[in-house]
Amino acid sequence: MTDSNKLEKFATDNQIEGLTEPSLKALMEKKTGYTIDKAKKFLSFQQRINEKLLKHPVITCNDYCRWFEQGNQNKAQVREFVVQFSVFSNLFLIAQLHKTINADTLEGMHASKEILANEIGVIFNAKKTPGAIADNSNTGENPDIVSTEGSVEGGQFRFKAAHFEWLYRMAQKLGLEFTDIGKRRHGTESTLFYCDELTRIYGNEDYLTSQAASYAVENWAAAGFWDQLVAGFEKFNDTREIKLPLGFFTWHALIETQHAAHTQEELEELYFERKIDEDKFIHDGNEMLDGVATFWDGLDIQRKRLTS
Ligand SMILES: [Fe+2]
């Protein structure tokens, strides 16, 4: 019997089908905190999450992204979209820094720093060997060839690998200057509300609040909005004389498919190893998604105004 067959049989015998492999393994090994009783409680919690959190409209029907995907946007609409995204991209650093500072374990702090350092320009070192020098092709100028895997540990810093700079290069093609993007003053009320909610909930001092927000945000991202944006931009590029460099969006679409696989494992680990207030988790997650929805709804209102 293979290992995964053994896990499957263990799950069926104990009526705990639906858990990820790492959790089943930990249960078999009777790791601290991992009991069959808790596993069953988790599965009913998961059902509540599916019903009460993952059906949030921003996950199930994002009007703006649906429209964007069609590729019928005019230049003014694309320009405004890039401006709002640049504000989000910069202000996200604040939320991520809060998350880093408020981490309650060194491991958690490292995980947050991975994201923060990568955002500002440390290229993931795909070799995962501390101290190793990243591949020379990883210049950072072209997000299409910058690794989406590995760790910032031993990775190289390049100004040009900052995600904001990828967006800046795109903005330049649209006739925008450095002073036209990325600042708080460029954000609409709804963009700023979203960014402030990220700092307040995702960067919360309470670790479980911040984890609930992370889980919600990851599930929103995994629902495919990056792919919709890429599809829309590709159509835009095909039919216009300007060719926008899409690296910022294609890179994020790619990294998201990897994140999605870990999101569920992380939630289970959190459930078995911590004491979760289930109602609060669902409440915090929804509050975060309301913030996300405000951002997209704001973009939707703005693009309707810019119809020519
Ligand atoms: Fe990013």
Image (cartoon, rainbow, N blue to C red):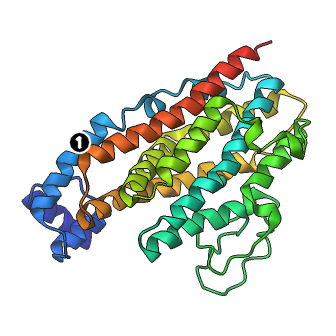
> Does residue 2 show up?
no
Q: Nearer the viewer, residue 208 or 148?
A: 208
Q: Position of residue 302 (x, y in %)?
A: 69, 22
Q: Is residue 21 left or right of residue 218?
A: left
Classify 133 as above or below 269.
below
Q: Quadrant of the C terminus?
A: top right
Q: Quadrant of the N terminus?
A: bottom left
Q: Position of residue 181 (x, y in %)?
A: 81, 42
Query: Residue drawn at (24%, 40%), measured in percent from left and top?
Result: 48
Q: Quadrant of residue 72?
A: top right
Classify 242 as above or below 30.
above
The type of residue carrying mark 1 is: Gln
Ligand 1 falls in quadrant:
bottom right
Disc 1 crowd rating (10 Å Cα; few below 14, some 14-19, many 20+) is few
Q: Position of residue 80 (x, y in %)?
A: 77, 30
Query: Residue drawn at (17%, 46%), measured in percent from left and top?
Result: 44
Query: Residue drawn at (58%, 68%), measured in percent from left and top?
Result: 114
Helix, strand or loop status at disc 1: helix
> Does residue 15 show up?
yes
Q: Is residue 94 left or right of residue 269?
A: right
Classify 245 as above or below 148.
above
Q: Position of residue 46 (x, y in %)?
A: 25, 47
Q: Nearer the viewer, residue 43 or 112?
A: 112
Answer yes or no: disc 1 within 8 Å of ligand 1: no
Residue extending farthest to the bottom is: 131
Number of numbered labels in the structure image: 1
The residue carrying mark 1 is 47
Classify 30 as above or below 55.
below
Q: Is residue 53 left or right of residue 137?
A: left
